[in-house]
Image: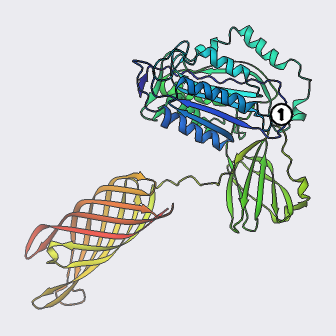
């Protein structure tokens, strides 16, 4: 973990402004900026783009944000982007409900350090004016930069915070938010989250900023502390705060003046999954709470969607006909559509999207990878031992494996030529192995280890002068496994070692090696 001259100071700022929205769904826009180069003597930041900016952009797109990114921009380019954001949020054609601003890079007590120092930097005063002038219902700002906590001070005293909320609420007609937005918690006010005012860190371990790393983890579902399927800003702060305290003993701060009926759902937590039958074809729409997903399904095969748990509705439109059914999506389990529960509806009365609903890209449910700790292998083997006088022995083997070792049972035979005729030989071999399996990529495992064991050696059984003996063994082996699917892999094993046996009237060691090719099955 590297000490970074930039102090990661992150704040989240939520506020509501009285701007009516003609769009039913929650429209989300994000402007993300990252800069690796600061002013003179500022250290180069290794991870702000690949570890912070781009992963955050992907995550925000997955939760319904329209995302614009800037990499290593000049102050002029940043100001132009702020103007773009103002125009985009003020659009009458598709007004924005939620706006998110993010910056990762260098800064000081007054301004951002965007490359070589200029006469007109981007100051906190400029950012404050930008944020205040946005005519959106919700705004979120994350700053991951040195001394960016100073931006909080630009808003003034606690009294000024309260006045800012009151100004935003002035002239709003009283209404019952639970009736107006039955599935969407509404929140007004201001929340500010800071990770530190001075020292913060980049992590070589995470290859990102420590705060951004945990913020991303939280948005992916880890921050859903109450397991209700929705991640609020409070939950995200709690998760990041606890995680950072354990990692670097650094405690973020949260300040806010908030008026709300329920916390705004910033991100979903996919605790459930929905099995859509093969006979369902057409436009499928799923809604749970304040989230909904749409998907075109043209292929007659079942699919599994990742969804938020709770009571929801599924609607299907195909060739001018529409149908709907209610479904209970259990936490941690899969729900299936029931053919008997469909009811036909007029297509013009399809699902109405209430205000505050968030449209998300549909995601196929991908089962988490099973740990490859236990497996069984079936292989064909080829053995060469010096004592076999240049002959190869062929056979098969079965192995029971753990990540740290296994048991291998081999059986193979050969036919040796002597002066008085051929002598068939059979070996039954049992070996205990110990080692470790490394995973290089998702599909490739490499095991290295050593073995001890013994072979039951049988020659000319059923004939006069037959020989039966035990051959102790010791050696090493290596195995490569290429997983063709999560459960089945192609296996190649090579081993070499010493056997002890009595040949030619003397008891002596001899060298042996073998190669085996087969398949491995995950247990």
Left/right of residue 102 with respect to residue 361 in the rendered view:
left
Residue 307 position in % (x across, y down): 70, 49
Q: Which residue is mark 1?
A: 21
Q: Residue furthest left?
A: 505
- What sort of colour scheme is used for the picture? rainbow
For label 1, the crowd category at 10 Å Cα-Cα, with few meaning under 14, some 14 to 19 and many 20 or more, is some
Q: Examine the rendering and report whether any part of residue 237 can be seen.
A: no
Q: How far across and down, in percent of the image, does residue 137 sit?
A: 78, 28
Q: Quick check: 114 left or right of 215? A: left
Q: Residue at x 32, y 58 (%)?
A: 433
The front one of 64 and 245 is 64
Quarter of the view holding residue 143: top right
Q: Quadrant of residue 195?
A: top right
Question: Considering only vertical position in the picture, is 225 above or below 520?
Answer: above
In this view, the residue in front, 211 or 475, is: 211
Q: Can you give x and y, in whole percent of width and height, for residue 82 in the image?
A: 64, 26
Residue 393 as seen in the image, left or right of residue 88: left
Question: Residue drawn at (19%, 68%), measured in percent from left and top?
Answer: 512
| Residue at point 73%, 10% (across, down) | 160
Can residue 460 be seen here? The reply is: yes
**Circle count:** 1
Residue at disc 1, secondary structure: loop
Q: Nearer the viewer, residue 422 or 460?
A: 422
179 or 488, which is in the foreground?
Answer: 179
| Residue at x-position 45% and y-position 35% | 207
Reply above or below: 56 against 452: above
Figure quadrant of the N terminus:
top left
Task: Give coordinates of residue 216: x percent, y percent.
Answer: 58, 36
């Amino acid at each position: 973990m590297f000490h970074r001259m930039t102090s990661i100071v992150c704040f989240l700022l939520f506020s509501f402004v009285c701007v009516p929205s003609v769009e039913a769904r929650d429209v989300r826009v994000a402007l993300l900026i990252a800069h690796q180069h600061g002013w003179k003597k500022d250290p180069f930041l290794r991870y702000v783009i690949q570890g912070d900016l781009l992963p955050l952009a992907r995550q925000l797109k997955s939760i319904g944000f329209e995302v614009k990114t800037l990499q290593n921009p000049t102050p002029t380019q940043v100001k132009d982007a702020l103007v773009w954001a103002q125009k985009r949020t003020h659009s009458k054609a598709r007004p924005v409900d939620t706006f998110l601003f993010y910056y990762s890079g260098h800064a000081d007590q007054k301004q951002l350090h965007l490359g070589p120092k200029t006469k007109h930097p981007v100051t906190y005063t400029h950012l404050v004016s930008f944020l205040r002038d946005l005519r959106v219902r919700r705004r979120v700002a994350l700053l991951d930069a040195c001394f960016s906590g100073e931006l909080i001070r630009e808003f003034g005293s606690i009294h000024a915070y309260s006045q800012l909320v009151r100004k935003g609420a002035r002239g709003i007609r009283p209404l019952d938010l639970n009736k107006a937005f039955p599935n969407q918690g509404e929140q007004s006010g201001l929340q500010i989250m800071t990770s530190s005012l001075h020292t913060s860190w980049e992590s070589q371990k995470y290859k990102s900023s420590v705060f951004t790393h945990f913020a991303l983890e939280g948005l992916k579902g880890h921050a859903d502390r109450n397991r209700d399927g929705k991640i609020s800003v409070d939950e995200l702060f709690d998760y990041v705060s606890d995680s950072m305290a354990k990692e670097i003993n650094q405690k973020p701060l949260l300040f806010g003046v908030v008026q709300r009926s329920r916390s705004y759902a910033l991100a979903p937590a996919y605790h459930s999954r929905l099995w859509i039958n093969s006979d369902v074809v057409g436009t499928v729409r799923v809604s749970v709470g304040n989230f909904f997903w749409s998907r075109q399904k043209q292929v007659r095969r079942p699919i599994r969607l990742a969804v938020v748990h709770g009571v929801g509705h599924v609607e299907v439109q195909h060739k001018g006909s529409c149908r709907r059914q209610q479904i209970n999506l259990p936490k941690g389990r899969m729900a299936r559509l029931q053919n008997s529960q469909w009811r036909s509806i007029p297509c013009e009365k399809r699902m109405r999207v209430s205000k505050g609903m968030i449209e998300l890209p549909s995601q196929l449910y991908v089962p988490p990878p099973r740990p490859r700790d236990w497996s069984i292998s079936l292989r064909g083997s080829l053995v060469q031992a010096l004592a076999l006088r240049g002959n190869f022995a062929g056979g098969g083997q079965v192995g029971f494996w753990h990540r740290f070792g296994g048991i291998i049972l081999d059986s193979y035979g050969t036919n040796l030529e002597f002066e008085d005729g051929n002598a068939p030989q059979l070996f039954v071999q049992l070996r205990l192995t110990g080692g470790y399996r490394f995973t290089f990529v998702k599909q490739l495992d490499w095991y290295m280890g050593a073995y001890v064991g013994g072979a039951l050696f049988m020659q000319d059984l059923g004939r006069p002068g037959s020989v039966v003996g035990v051959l102790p063994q010791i050696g090493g082996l290596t195995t490569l496994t290429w997983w063709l699917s999560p459960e089945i892999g192609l296996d190649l094993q090579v081993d070499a070692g010493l056997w002890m046996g009595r040949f030619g009237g003397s008891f002596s060691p001899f060298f042996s090696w073998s190669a085996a090719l087969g398949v491995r099955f995950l247990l």
